Image: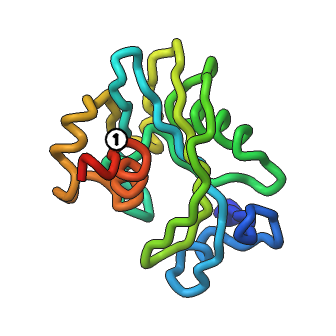
Amino acid sequence: MSLPEELFPVVDDDGNEISLAPRSVCHDGKSMLLHPVVHLHLLNPNGDLFLQKRAMTKDLLPGMWDTSVGGHMSSGETAEEALRREAEEELGLKDLTFHLNKKYKWQSPRERELVYSFTGSCNDIPVTNPDEIDEGRFWEMEEIKESLGKNIFTPNFEFEFNMLYITHSDI
């Protein structure tokens, strides 16, 4: 017997929940239902950014490097609650300090997301969940900049990294 399919909240442009839809519908490339997600950019004291390599079992972008933590919000959950849940689920982080950077809409050929992007730090050492992540490590900012555009990172991570860390004078 299979588990019931995960239901995602469908939201308006402001993030207000208007309905629920199955994961498969939100990711089918046809419905393009806007659904909320959280991203965390975890920085260490040296300013290095922890990135995760998405598990090869993921339905979207397997094997690509991505934000430290990323996940879908549940119905009725705040972005902050979702971020804490996902950080513990993916990296075992419990003592997390964070702030919201930006809320923006992202669209790929398969889905449309309302992204709540956070930056944070933690005293815990990240321990990757092998069901979600193939590997993870801290990257120096220059190493990330040198690797942009080389099909190493997810397109959403590259967009978000450019938006958050690269100023117009750097381009």
Residue 63 can be seen in this image: no
Closest to the observer, 64 or 44 = 44
Residue 152 vertical placement versus 52 (above, below):
below
Which residue is pictured at 27% across the width and 34% down the height? Answer: 141
Residue 33 vertical placement versus 152 (above, below):
below
Which residue is pictured at 40% across the width and 15% down the height? Answer: 45
Which quadrant holds residue 72? bottom right
Residue under pointer 1: 134
Which quadrant holds residue 3? bottom right
Percent across and percent down for residue 24 are: 59, 73
Which residue is pictured at 52% across the width and 47% down the height? Answer: 70
Residue 86 can be seen in this image: yes
Assign a secondary structure to mark 1.
strand
Is 162 left or right of 39, judged from the image as shown? left
Closest to the observer, 3 or 77 = 77
The quadrant of the picture occupied by the N terminus is bottom right
Percent across and percent down for residue 63 are: 30, 52
